[in-house]
Image (cartoon, rainbow, N blue to C red):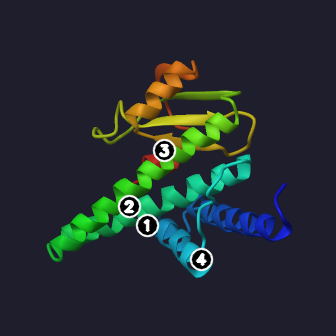
Amino acid sequence: MMNDTLDCSIKSFFENRDRLIISHMNGEIDKKMFLELNHNYMIENKVKPFVMIDSFEKGMYNYQFYNIMAKYNKMIAQDIKESGKNIDFYAKYLDDVKHYYDEKDKTIFRLLRFLKYNNVEAYFVSMESTALNGKLYEIVLKDYEFAILHSCSEWMLSVLRKENVFLDQIQKSIIDYYVNNTY
């Protein structure tokens, strides 16, 4: 069982994230601002991932942490590349992106293992980006509201297939407004 301080920090993290999702859905902020505000919240509140995933909440918290960090660093790398300056920093940010996506995939694995793959469904997502078509897949945790994970990991895809939760078909993402929106 989580202690009260831990429970409050997770609750606060998701309340902030939910507010930002609603703002994004309502067109009040774009995807770039969504990522920046999430990142700023994590820095200001010294958010760190949990070492062990022994609850759904900790797993989702870690997933969101690594996902936001990966996307934020990717956004910064893209800005550096477009400016044509600081190419050394560009490579460093790309290394960070890879690290955070790898950690996100490990988190997905640990969370699904904790949930024993119960009521999990995964499938490829229909993407506007040709680079992501046939690579990005969605993992839906059907017992939980708004529990939608994404990955391109080949090893995680193998695990999902082995566990018989992957449907070999392409579907529109439940959060298509987000996954097909560039930043």
User: Which quadrant holds the C terminus?
Assistant: bottom left
Q: Can residue 176 be seen in this view?
A: no
Residue type, mark 4 in image = Lys
Mark sitting earlier along the chain (3/2): 3
Mark sitting earlier along the chain (2/1): 1
Q: Which disc is residue 183 wearing?
A: 2
Q: In this view, does 22 lie to the left or right of 72?
A: right
Q: What element carries label 4?
A: loop
Is there a contact, CB below 8 Å, between mark 3 and mark 2?
no
User: Which quadrant holds the N terminus?
Assistant: bottom right
Is there a contact, CB below 8 Å, between mark 2 and mark 1?
yes
The part of the image, by quadrant, that contains residue 114 is top right
Mark sitting earlier along the chain (3/4): 4
Q: Name the residue under label 3.
A: 105
Q: In this view, does 18 lie to the left or right of 156?
A: right
The part of the image, by quadrant, that contains residue 62 is bottom right
Distance of mark 2 from mark 4, alpha carbons?
A: 25 Å
Q: What element carries label 3?
A: helix
Q: Which disc is residue 32 wearing?
A: 1
Instruction: Work out whether 111 lies above or below 35.
Output: above
Q: In this view, does 57 lie to the left or right of 125?
A: right
Local crowd size for mark 3, using a 10 Å CA cut-off: few (<14), some (14–19), many (≥20): many
Q: Which disc is residue 46 wearing?
A: 4
| Residue 72 at x, y percent in the picture | 42, 65
Q: Is mark 1 on a helix, strand or loop?
A: helix
Distance of mark 2 from mark 1, alpha carbons?
A: 5 Å
Residue type, mark 2 in image = Tyr
